[in-house]
Amino acid sequence: MDYFEVLLLEKTASPGEIKKAFYRESRTYHPDRFFHMESKELKERVHELYKRVTEAYYVLRDDTKRKKYLADIAGPERAQKLRFTEASEAETKAAAKKEQEEQIGTHPKGRQFYQQAQKDAEGGNLSAAERNMKMALTYEPSNARYKERLAEVQKQLADEAKNKDNSFKIR
């Protein structure tokens, strides 16, 4: 069963519906309701079911985890992806961190120069932007984002120079 089935929900359930379903199922399967039972095996099964209800709520209440979970259970490896494990969460966090680092860089000085270059470019100071992008690349020479941005700035500078040359020829 996937988490939506555990909480008796549609896959399009709203956050409010998820919360209501969790509280409903939590009250039904809470281990404290079964403390008086003799069967240890039954108590353990109820406890496992309660843990699954809690796990379902933990994943479905978080928009990011819910999107990933929906994609996972819709894919070809559905059977392996029904449970959201700590390992898959760590994998998701590591991928997000890597993506963020690739976007703006891993070195604090590199990020600082990159951000300054962005401000310079937005302000129209392309030569300062180029200089700051080159400085950012000294800290992170393999950062593809920095290289791409430097190439964009250099192309803008070349276009600007070309336009100046053409305006002089016209006069």
Image (spheres, rainbow, N blue to C red):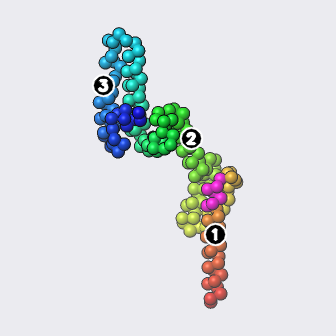
What residue lies at 62% left-to-right and 66% top-to-bottom? Answer: 153
The residue that disc 2 covers is: 94
Q: Is residue 34 above or below residue 135?
A: above
Observer-side mark, 1 or 3, equals 3
The residue that disc 1 covers is: 155
Amino acid found under the numbered disc labelled 2: Ala
The picture places residue 144, in percent across and down from the top left corner, at 64, 55
Residue 92 versus residue 120: which sits nearer the camera?
92
Quadrant in which the C terminus is drawn: bottom right
Q: Earlier in the sequence, mark 2 or mark 3?
A: 3
**What residue span does the magenta drawing correspond to?**
143-149
The picture places residue 131, in percent across and down from the top left corner, at 66, 62
Residue 104 versus residue 17: which sits nearer the camera?
17
The disc label shown at residue 28, or none: 3
Q: Is residue 164 above or below residue 151?
A: below
Dominant SS of magenta comes to helix
